[in-house]
Image (cartoon, rainbow, N blue to C red):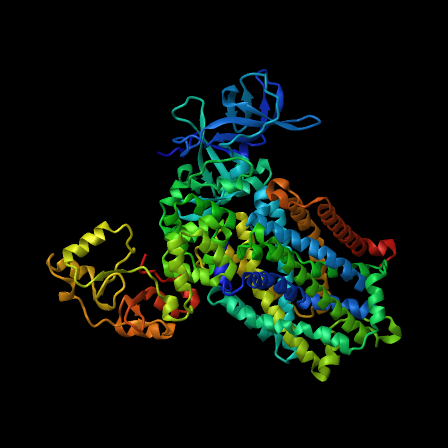
Amino acid sequence: MWARLARLGQGARGRSRSWRLYLTALGPGLVAAAAGNDVGGIATYASVGAKYGYDLIWMMVVTAFALVAVQEQCARLGAVTGKGLSDLIREQFGPRWSVVAMTGFLIANGGVTVTEFVGIAVAADLFGVPRFLAVPAMALLVWWLIVYGNYRRVERLFLVLALVSLAYPISAVLGNPDWSEVLQHAVVPTVRMDPGYILLFVATVGTTISPYMQMYQQDAVVDKGVTAEDLRYARADVLAGCVFSILVAICIMVATAATIFASSPGGMGVEIATAEDAARALAPIAGPYASYLFGVGIFGASMLAAGVLPLATAASVCEAFGFERGVELTLSEAPIFYGLLTVLIAGGAVIALVPGLPVIRLLIVVQAVNGVILPILLVFITRMAGNRQLMGRHANGAVHGALAWVVTVVIGSLAILMLATSLFGPWLGIG
Amino acid sequence: MSLVAPVHVLNVAQTVGAPVHGRAGEYIGRLHDVVARVLEAGDELFPPLTGLVIRMGGLRTHSVFVPWMSVREFGPTGVTLASSRLDLRPFTRRDGELLVAGDVLDKQVVDVDGRRVVRVNDVQLAPDPRVPGGWRVAAADISVGSFLARVVPRWMVPSLRSRFPANVVISWDQVEFFASDVPGVKLRVDHANLARMHPADLAELIAELGYRQTQEVLTALDDERAADVVEWLPSEVQAAVLTSLDDEKAGDILDEMEKDVAADILADLPHEEARDLLDAMEPEEAADLSRLLAHAPNTAGGLMSTEYLAIGSTLTVAETIKRLRDADWLPDEIPYLYVLDGEPDGRLVGTVTLRDLVLAEPETRLDTFMVRDVITLTLDMSSDEVADEFTHYDLVAMPVVGDDGRLLGIVTVDDAIDVLLPKEWRPRIPRIFH
């Protein structure tokens, strides 16, 4: 575990512990937030804003509570046990259940990896670079950086590029939305029963509370050597990261609602189909350069996640199953680790290049798949966080435990509802 | 001695869950776990089984303990008890009892021989050659086949086994498991095997462990050993590891560490935490460290260590060697002896190597053969300048002197070289002065 801290190379360099701990602990929160607002997140939030205006903003407020509840549990699991999520699932639930959990992670993270390469393709299109050149080149670059280079170095560059998503709050303000209406929709739920609405609902939950965020949160806490005594710093970080992530997401919705939804014919809302559509939400801040700004942000976020996700997923799976892992090993020492890593990157790039992909649709479906896998993983997480033998006095209390189970059951029911409506919707007459 | 034999080996994972029958063949319950004793010295290499935990069915399932003498048959297809009478009180474990399935299966353990952390997919039990009918824990099985055997349905196991045999097993005397993974009971795990490992190997192992296991290992080692291990850890990790320990142990470890390394770690910590650790140290060592901490980290003062030998110039070789023999503390490596014009803190007037000392006649005074042209550093030289001096003169250590010519400390080449290297190379550079 400490080895990963060493590799991060961003360990103990500050002067004040509270400041340093906050910043190192802020790392996971900030990165998870920035990664949460990746191409899939932006596509989902923008679609929600364009199709339903402010109608779904209340959901982000509810999701915020769920997000904090989930991420805090993972931070606590890491700080109390000193073990990563996949490690702990294997130890607590045995081989069969860990295969279930790891399969979930592989599908969810594999899907998200595909979307990251779609994001690179989209950015290439916006800048007029042929995607059949850009995507394989970037896939190769990411792979090479991880295996032979120092991914952690360049990671920061991508992180900075990804901070372009901060343009959305500014754009949201410049777009001059009706803030009283925004506020009203944040508090008063609007519920509809059509499959499109439920799909977007699940996708929004799936992209806001992605499975890899739990994995990342817990592993990062463990890597930094955060102990049970430091728990309050880790909690402060979780809270800050979640609030930041939710605010940016709401701003993306508001920005698209104020631009695309507001100008849609008859105020009926439109479905976003292309990246150019989504980029229009940045018009208030960037004017004619909106699509370039959008492209830069998408590129940064995609490159960041295209490296972090396959790396973290391969390491996690190998950790659970006891295979050798780590970039400091050679290819022959850790064949399964490098094999998984390569398959995830190459597979993501190849699928992203399939001609005629409905880009936005694909991005949203992947987030919805995340939303289906999430409740399965939440069962593992919530059971462990409530296990008194494992967690001692840091186990979930009655209130926290109940809240965590409510979140799990509600998200699970939503996922089942979505599957039911999208599979059987036509027969039920709501398709 | 090895108990890993192809005959009569039982896999715990495949045995747990097997039906348990009474003497008359009546069904009692299912095997839940296997209890081994790890408390008594001498048994620890291969812990003997002391009994079984059986889960009884019914409306309220509960577990009972069956001592080994009441077990008549123990095999993969099931367990038969020697009597039909059971102690029905619910099983509670006692100190020194290891639940082989619950505590070891799926956990990470150290393969001492292979110097790595591995995950246990199965545990092999073998008949005790000395006790008829007795069994012992023989080996940890880490093969992929044994993992797969626990994932697929039971009927597929035989065919799977023929393709993926249990081919990677670690004899139990080479396995170190972590008591911190077993909450609630005291298990005496002295980690004697780990203490015998090279500190560099141990540091590499620790880099793979969580903080609780790290605490357990470092606490089990004696302070000097623990200090060696911490010195071998990558510099980014050292502070995090020390602060995860309790202050007292961390202070003890700092006492034993090389002062310049300890100072670097404390300099990385916020003021109040460094203060706490200094308070936990021996007053003398803490005072030394505080002096080093007063210098900016990227100067000669920040790089230097106060661990050197200084001696008066009027002493003879014999007297000097006697001093060395009688000293209750010496640095690990002695590149030079620093010769002063008066003790204890005179001006630096020369250096002598151990080689010079051995070759000189016992009655010769140091000032007759010492090297007088000593190249020195000053406190405020930047670390880059220090590194330049080292590459220019090709020395292994250089003294730092004050304006008045007094010796303040020494910088060793490994610390000076660190400045020149990109960070990620550093852990791979062998430290010369260990």
For residue B230, side relative to residue A352 (left or right): left
Closer to the camera, B223 or B423?
B223
Q: Quadrant of residue A219?
A: bottom right
Residue for point 69% across, 79% down? A291
Q: Position of residue A342 (x, y in %)?
A: 53, 61
Quarter holding the C terminus of chain A is bottom right
Q: Quadrant of residue A387?
A: top right
Asked if one can make out residue A342 in the rendered structure from this viewpoint, the answer is yes
For residue B269, side relative to residue A96 (left or right): left
Outermost residue on the right side: it is: A266
Q: Position of residue A40 (x, y in %)?
A: 69, 66
Residue for point 81% across, 68% down? A51
Closer to the camera, B119 or B243?
B243
For residue B203, side relative to residue A187 (left or right): left
Asked if one can make out residue A338 in the rendered structure from this viewpoint, the answer is no
| Residue B165 drawn above or below residue B255 | above
Q: How many marks?
A: 0
Q: Position of residue B414 (x, y in %)?
A: 34, 64
Q: Quadrant of residue B43?
A: top left
Q: Position of residue B123 (x, y in %)?
A: 49, 36
Closer to the camera, B127 or A34?
A34
| Residue A197 drawn above or below residue B5 | below
| Residue B3 drawn above or below residue B67 | below
